[in-house]
Amino acid sequence: HAERIVLGHGSGGRMTHDLIRTIFQAHLGNPYLNAGNDFAHLPLSLGKPDIGHLAVSTDSHVISPLFFPGGDIGRLAVCGTVNDVSMSGAIPLYLTAGFILEEGLSLESLERIVRSMRIAAEEAGVVLVAGDTKVVEKGKGDGMFITTTGIGWIPPDRPPLGGACAQPGDVVLLSGPIGDHGIAVLSARGELGFETEIQSDVAPLNHLIQALLQSAPHTHVLRDPTRGGLATTLNEIAQQSQVAIRIEETAIPIRPAVRAACEMLGLDPLYIANEGKVIAIVPPEEADAALAAMHRAPYGAEAVRIGYVESQPAGRVILRTMLGTHRILEILSGEMLPRIC
Amino acid sequence: HAERIVLGHGSGGRMTHDLIRTIFQAHLGNPYLNAGNDFAHLPLSLGKPDIGHLAVSTDSHVISPLFFPGGDIGRLAVCGTVNDVSMSGAIPLYLTAGFILEEGLSLESLERIVRSMRIAAEEAGVVLVAGDTKVVEKGKGDGMFITTTGIGWIPPDRPPLGGACAQPGDVVLLSGPIGDHGIAVLSARGELGFETEIQSDVAPLNHLIQALLQSAPHTHVLRDPTRGGLATTLNEIAQQSQVAIRIEETAIPIRPAVRAACEMLGLDPLYIANEGKVIAIVPPEEADAALAAMHRAPYGAEAVRIGYVESQPAGRVILRTMLGTHRILEILSGEMLPRIC
Ligand SMILES: Nc1ncnc2c1ncn2[C@@H]1O[C@H](COP(=O)(O)OP(=O)(O)OP(=O)(O)O)[C@@H](O)[C@H]1O
Ligand SMILES: Nc1ncnc2c1ncn2[C@@H]1O[C@H](COP(=O)(O)OP(=O)(O)OP(=O)(O)O)[C@@H](O)[C@H]1O
Ligand SMILES: [Mg+2]
Ligand SMILES: [Mg+2]
Ligand SMILES: [Mg+2]
Ligand SMILES: [Mg+2]
Ligand SMILES: [Mg+2]
Ligand SMILES: [Mg+2]
């Protein structure tokens, strides 16, 4: 083909999914990869009795600018990977980081970012065990890119958890207000055209997830609504589980400043990236306990119930609007905000 | 500081080491990272009886051009990480890959590279279990960068192995001729100014390493002489082990075409990168068995003994030249060939 990569291939929406399916899964596919979760769930048996499993996840971070209200690329790189590993129910233990530095980057910026990684890693309780450092000529990169990989341990008795495990009757929980990260990055780029106090929500969610799983051990799905936002992530789950997910517009928390920014820019907050939020889908009998656990945990004070799972129409996400009408929420198509993570 | 990143920080020599020490280890340091090996050696006990350890390694790949004689960035990304994991004595099992794609990259190139990753992974017997895909605007990247992380399993009874384990009396082995990769990349860039048949040596060494360890189970050090070449890698080992390493210039295999290219360009082949070679430092009583095992294994047919380890002068690498004189081989300083891996 004479086709070329465009920015939309990095959106996290339909174009990213199609590229992953037609190129990466087509050639590199295997059951671990094809599961399509935030993490790979890997057996550790090696001929021995079952001693648990590994959860492994990787993300490359290309956010621009490197510093934004509430965080920087270093904090993002640690939290993003800690969170994806945590979505498996694993306890994240180890991180690796590959740095691609552009010639001309100031050592002061690099040092600030590395310090910030240290703070985030300490908060999450993970250790950076291996790294790599490459430099590209000026104009062949953009300050710095950081690729982190995380390894966690899944206890042998953990019930299955993943995007394919949602069941009709389940309750959909969300750990707090959406859209903060994407709007904070736009504001750092000066693209808002006005001042806002919005800070990125970038945070490690592993302690919140552990608390949630303690109280709701039969949790079916955990996923962080990053690129593509809440709407796209719910669509991924609806597709993987072949269920319908129904959510209430009035139940979705959005800060007034985020709502205002989205209105001015013509953006839909349901498609804006988050970096410190989790969607939890739990059986109805554990929903109250799960919500209470989130409320007590760090970064979960504003957790709410936003909807529920039904069997039909399978693969669909349906929003009941403020007006009481119903709207199908599609997966993000095209590209919304490039380079936000 | 007002200091900035320069290409030499990515050379793999003194500037890279200083940057890692003063910025990365200073803020993120811990015993796993500070060991300074190709891999991190991680306990898997988790409160259970010793059931083995993990070996983990990561490398970002920024090679330019993406395709070169004997390989491409995809093969390099798989082999580079398989090799670093293998240097621990581990059996590499799992890989992750983060892709940073530049807008405008042709899907055809991407697909060729992904196919090539598949072939290399199959040869090595590793499975790609997780990935990530980001896109940056034209002019903010360079075609594509790939960061791979590898996970391997180290049996609980494996004797310690690493850069700090060389001992006086040990024998230094090298798996084949040096400099092929660096010269092949220069030739692909058209920087040689003449034709050469040299192909990169990029290859997965895990089967060779397993064969070697079967025959020489008390091997002390394994390391692949990548950026900075044979001379820099031997210096790293001499430093970590606080020993002297003495090598014979006449014993070091260099293909005539590589020697010719180096002479024309004023390059020293001892500092040119390799991507399919290993240095093995073994106790004298296992040296013959190790060499014989390498000769029988894939990519080891041209393995040779190149020197030995002494106690003094600690931290030094000394070359006995063709003329019988002695020359201290320093670590690579400044920058030699940028973007060769
Ligand atoms: N940015 C970094 N942060 C922390 N540790 C790093 C960083 N870069 C490298 N290291 C560590 O420094 C050591 C040497 O890394 P280096 O990349 O030179 O080794 P290598 O991968 O074997 O060589 P190459 O990258 O040339 O293939 C390793 O232990 C690695 O984990
Ligand atoms: N280039 C790739 N090759 C193979 N698998 C990939 C690739 N990119 C993504 N994947 C896989 O696709 C799934 C979705 O990846 P994605 O990056 O969208 O998830 P995420 O990391 O949770 O989201 P984000 O990157 O926005 O934080 C994961 O299972 C991931 O392993
Ligand atoms: Mg995720
Ligand atoms: Mg992620
Ligand atoms: Mg490296
Ligand atoms: Mg190495
Ligand atoms: Mg390496
Ligand atoms: Mg990702």
Image: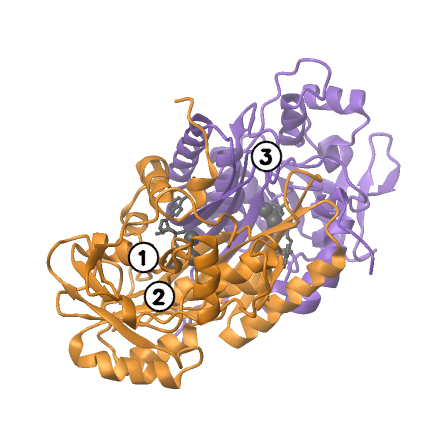
Chain colours: A purple, B orange
Residue carrying label 3: A303
Residue B165 placement: quadrant: bottom left
Q: Is ligand 3 within 8 Å of the beta carbon of the residue shown at mark 3? A: no
Residue placed at 30% from the left, 62% from the top? B45
Which of the pair A169/B94 is nearer the observer? B94
Is residue B255 shown above or below A250? below
Q: Quadrant of the N terminus of chain B?
A: top left
Q: Real-space Cα distance between discs 2 and 3?
A: 46 Å
Residue carrying label 2: B87
Residue placed at 63% from the left, 25% from the top? A184
Q: On what subunit does the disc labeled 1 rest?
A: B
Kindly report which numbered mark, 2 or 3, lies closer to the viewer in this rendering.
2
**Residue type (three-letter) at the residue carrying disc 2:** Met
Crowding at dot 3, Cα within 10 Å, few <14 / some 14-19 / many 20+, comes out as: many
Residue placed at 56% from the left, 63% from the top? B129
**Residue type (three-letter) at the residue carrying disc 1:** Ala
Which of the pair A224/B333 is nearer the observer? B333
Q: On what subunit does the disc labeled 3 rest?
A: A
Kindly report which numbered mark, 1 or 2, lies closer to the viewer in this rendering.
1
Residue carrying label 1: B231
Q: On what subunit does the disc labeled 2 rest?
A: B
Kindly report which numbered mark, 1 or 3, lies closer to the viewer in this rendering.
1
Q: Is ligand 6 within 8 Å of the beta carbon of the residue shown at mark 2? A: yes
Check if mark 1's residue and mark 2's residue have beta carbons within 8 Å: no
For mark 3, give the secondary structure: loop
For mark 2, give the secondary structure: loop
Residue placed at 75% from the left, 54% from the top? B106
User: How far across and how far down the image is residue B194, in percent?
Assistant: 59, 61
User: How far across and how far down the image is residue B228, in percent?
Assistant: 38, 53
